[in-house]
Image (tube, rainbow, N blue to C red):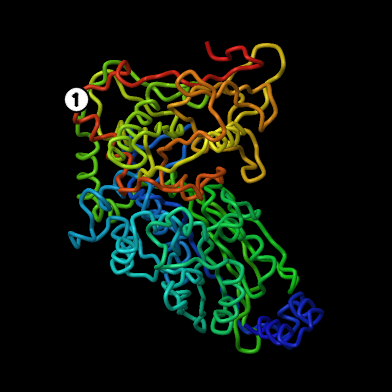
Amino acid sequence: MQRRRYRAAALSAGMAVLAVTAGAATPAAAAPGGPSDELDITLLATTDLHGRVQDWDYFRDARYTESAGYATGLARVGSVVDQVRADKGEDSVLVVDNGDFLQGTPLSYYYARQEPVTETGAEHPMAAAYDAIGYDAQVVGNHEFNYGLDLLQAYTEDVDHPVLGANVVDAATGEPYLQPYTLRRMHVPGHKPVTVGILGLTTPGSAIWDRGNVEGRVEFQDMVEAAERWVPVVDRQADVVVVLSHAGVGGTSSYDPAQAPTENPADVIARTVPGIDAMVVGHTHRNAPSQVVVNEVTGEDVLLTQPYRWGATVSQVDIGLEKVRGQWDVVSTAATALRTDRYPEDPAVLAATADAHARTVEYVNQVVATSAEALPAATSPWEDTPILDFIQDVQTDTVGAALEGTEYADLPVLSIAAPFSRDAVFPQGDVTVRDIAGLYVYDNTLEAVTLTGAQVRAYLEYSARYYRTAPATGAVDPASLTNAVAPEAPNGIPDYNYDQLSGVTYDVDVAQPVGSRIVGLSHDGQPVADDEVFVVAVNNYRRSGGGGFPGISTAPVVYNEQQEIRQLLIDRAQSTGVIDPADFAVENWRLVRSGALLVP
C-alpha cells in the first residue's frame, strides 16, 4: 500500500508530477535493503455466464458444441478452479464473477417464471453452482434486473458471497442498494496477511432496458463517477484493489447517451481513476484475456482482463507483491485465459444442480404443437420468413384484442420482430417448448405504442443501417451484406438489432445510402402518409430504448400488460395445436438492389 499512500497524498495536494514519479519508482529501491518478503496471489474470474450451470444446450437438448470448440457452464469452471487451487495453494486463490448470471437459458427462465424461487423458497440453481465452487464475490450485470428486484434479492440471500454494485443506489435514499465493495483478507502460510479490496460496478443501461422493474426503486450512477468515489475508499483499506466492471471498453453505447451514462467505460475508469491494480471486464462477450491501460494520473499500468462468455474461459490473473516498509505493494500483474473445454465437469457442481437441470430438460421437451412444414430462421436476416411472421402475427393479435373497445381500436396495428437466432427452426411435426424458446431467446415482454407514418419510416431507415451497401452490379450474396459496422457496433450491428415490420409493405434498397433505403412504404395498398397514426407492437427492450431506434422510447404507450412474448408464442401454439404458415405468413418486405429483387 505504500505506493498508493504516495498517490493519495499527491492527489490531495494537486501534485500530479509527484504522483507520477512515485508511481514509477521501483518498490525495492524505495526500501533500503530491499523487500523483506515476496508473495504471489491468483485471481480467477468469470463473466457473463447467463444461466449456464452445466455444459448443455437446452435448445438442442444436447451437449453444447461450437466450431471453435469452446465449452460452457459453471461445472467446467469448477474443475478449472479446483486445479488452480491445487497448483497455487487454496489460500492464495480468489474467485470472482463479473455479472450477468440470472438470465440467458431455459433453466434460468424456469426458476424465474415457471417455478420461481421467489415463491418456492428453493435455492436458485445458479447460486447452488457458485457456492459449490466457492466464489469470493461477484458484481451484478444488467441482466440481473430482468426478472425484477425480488428475484435478485432472493439470489443475494442464497449465495455465500457478497453481490456487489457500487453504482446501484436506492432511488428514495440515494444510499447503495447493494454492497459497494468487499475486503478479502488472505492468509497465505508463511506470509503476512494480504487484504484484497474488490469493488463492483455495473453498466447503467439497466435504467433503460429494465425501466419497468427498476424505475422509482433503484437508480444507476455513472460508472466513472462511482469509481472516483469508491476506489479511494477501498484503496485506503486494501493492499490490492480489484474492480469488477460489468461493462466493456471503448466508451460505446447501444442507446442514446442522453438517456443514461456511457455503457462501456471500463478503459476510461482504468485510465482516469488512480489506485486500481486490476479490472475484470465484461458485458460485451469478447474474449480479451489481457489489456494494459496506463493510468494518466500515476503513470502506472492497470491490467484489464475479459473472460469469454458463458464460462468458455476463466481469466487467471497472477499478482506479484513485495513487502515494502512492512506493507504489501503490487509489483506485477499478468493475465492468461484458461479454456474450460480442456477440463471435465466438476462432480460437485453437477450434483448441486442435477435436479434443476433435469426439471428444465423435462420442461423444454414438452410438445406444444405440430408444424405443417419445417420453418427455419436461417435466412431471416435478409428475407421475410414465415417463422418470424409467426411472432408478428401473435404480437399483432394480442395487441389488437387488448385494444378492442378503446380509443385505439380503429388504428392499424403493426408489429416489430428481429431475427434473434439464425439456428432457430420449427421442425415439420412435433414442436416443443425448446423449439419456440430457440426462436425467441430473450425474456422480453410485449408492449405497444403509437407512431406516425413519418416515425415508422425513420424507424425502418435506422434499422436498414444493418446492411452494407451492395455493389452496383454483379452477383451478390445477401448474407454478405448483413451486420454492417456502425459507430456503436464496431464488430457489426447484431442480428437482434435488425427490426422488421409487419402490417406495412416496403422494400429495402441496399444500393442506396443509409437513410434513403426504404422504398414503397405503404399500408393497404396506399402510400403511408407522414401524419398517419399506427399502433406498433414491440418488445419492452426496444421500447425502452435498447438499440437506440428513433422515436420508440418516447412514443405514447397504449399497451403493457407485462406478458412475456415467448409465453404468448407457446400459448398460441398450444391453443391452435397446428402451426401452419398458410394461417399467418405474409411476405410484406423485400431486399432489393436498385429496385431489382435480391432474394428470388
**Residue at left offset 33%, top offset 67%:** 156
The quarter in which the N terminus is drawn is: bottom right
Quadrant location of residue 534? Answer: top left
Q: Secondary structure at mark 1?
A: loop
Label tally: 1
**Residue at left offset 42%, top offset 40%:** 538
Q: Seen in the image, is 275 located left or right of residue 376? A: right
Q: Position of residue 318 (x, y in %)?
A: 57, 64
Identify residue for label 1.
577
Going by the numbered disc 1, the residue's amino acid type is: Gly
Q: Nearer the viewer, residue 437 or 213?
A: 213
Q: Position of residue 520 (x, y in %)?
A: 57, 21
Does residue 61 appear in this view? Answer: no
Does residue 254 appear in this view? Answer: yes
Q: Position of residue 404 (x, y in %)?
A: 28, 37
Q: Nearer the viewer, residue 122 or 573?
A: 573
Vertical placement of residue 392 versus 22, above or below: above
Q: Position of residue 378 (x, y in %)?
A: 45, 24
Number of other residues with Cα within 10 Å of mark 1, as a class: few under 14, some 14 to 19, many 20 or more: some
Q: Nearer the viewer, residue 73 or 228?
A: 228
Vertical placement of residue 23 versus 593, above or below: below
**Residue at left offset 48%, top offset 48%:** 309
Q: Seen in the image, is 276 located left or right of residue 151? A: right
